[in-house]
Image: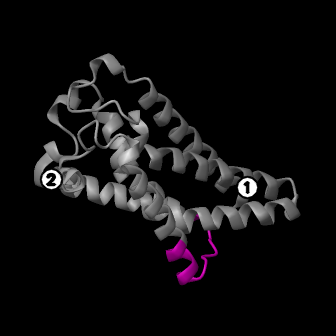
């Protein structure tokens, strides 16, 4: 694909994710159902973290394209290698996990991940922007942009480290786990084990 076309695609994707993040941040808290706890606000949800990650990724991709267009190849090389690492280690795996796990649990029992009471708070289009549209964007990125992938061992270590950080933050008793219910009901078993 031509660099100018890629730049336009990455710019549009960045604007889309920026808009989705903006829309989520303006969902009114007073309409929040009782099932949605306050601790950590929306940052405790992997879906929200993924949307921010996608916005950062597409911003970096757009910057790399612009640098290539204006012939700043030395700077572009560094940004491109960062973009490739970010995509292969975080952006693609996390977006795939969020989409597949959300819709699998939603199909099994929607109350586990998205209680019916949220329908009145979060519009349907925003739910699909958070959980459905991320997967086609990720696959389109694979097809549209050639990436250099890190060694399998390095990629898995980095992904494992980030997953460990997220899980540690979520389950650490100092982060308010004792003071509130878990984010999702499937994880309540961990809380009861933690309290023993």
In the image, residue 57 lies at what x, y percent? 59, 53
SS type, badge 1: helix
Q: Which mark is residue 107?
A: 2
Q: Residue at x 38, y 51 (%)?
A: 172
The verdict on residue 65 being magenta is no
Note whether residue 143 is visible. Answer: no
Answer left or right for 181 relative to 52.
Answer: left
Please report the bounds of the magenta region as a residue range: 144-157
Q: Residue at x 61, y 77 (%)?
A: 150
Whether 151 is among the magenta residues is: yes
Q: Which mark is residue 144?
A: none
Is residue 59 toward the left or the right of residue 191 in the image?
A: right
Q: Residue furthest top?
A: 30
Question: In which quadrant is the N terminus drawn?
Answer: bottom right
Vertical position of residue 23 compared to residue 72: above or below: above
Marks 2 & 1, CB-CB < 8 Å contact: no
Residue at x-position 58% and y-position 44%? 14
Whichever of callouts 2 and 1 sits on the residue coming sooner in the sequence is 1
- Above or below for 8 versus 82: above
Report whether 35 appears left or right of 50: left
What kind of element bears circle 2? helix
Name the quadrant containing residue 100.
Answer: bottom left
Q: Residue under circle 1?
A: 65
Give the distance between the C-alpha atoms of the residues marked 2 and 1, in whole angstroms.
Answer: 39 Å
The residue lying at 35 percent from left, 40 percent from top is 176
Image position, residue 63 (x, y; %): 73, 50
Judged from this view, the residue extending furthest toward the left is 109
Image coordinates for residue 103, horizontal then vertical, percent:
24, 53
Closer to us: 9 or 14: 14
């Amino acid at each position: 694909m031509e660099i100018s076309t890629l730049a336009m695609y990455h710019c549009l994707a960045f604007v889309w994710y920026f808009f989705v993040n903006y829309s989520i941040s303006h969902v009114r808290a007073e309409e929040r159902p009782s099932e949605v706890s306050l601790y950590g606000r929306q940052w405790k949800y992997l879906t929200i973290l993924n949307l921010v990650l996608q916005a950062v990724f597409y911003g970096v991709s757009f910057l790399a394209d612009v640098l290539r267009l204006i012939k700043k190849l030395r700077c572009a090389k560094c940004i491109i290698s960062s973009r490739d690492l970010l995509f292969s280690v975080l952006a693609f795996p996390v977006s795939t996990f969020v989409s597949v796990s959300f819709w699998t649990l939603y199909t099994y029992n929607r109350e586990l991940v998205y209680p019916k009471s949220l329908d009145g708070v979060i519009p349907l289009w925003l739910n699909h922007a958070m959980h459905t549209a991320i997967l086609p964007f990720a696959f389109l990125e694979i097809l549209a942009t050639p990436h250099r992938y890190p060694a399998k061992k390095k990629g898995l270590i980095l992904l494992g480290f980030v997953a460990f950080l997220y899980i540690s933050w979520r389950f650490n008793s100092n982060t308010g786990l004792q003071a509130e219910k878990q984010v999702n009901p499937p994880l309540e078993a961990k809380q009861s084990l933690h309290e023993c």
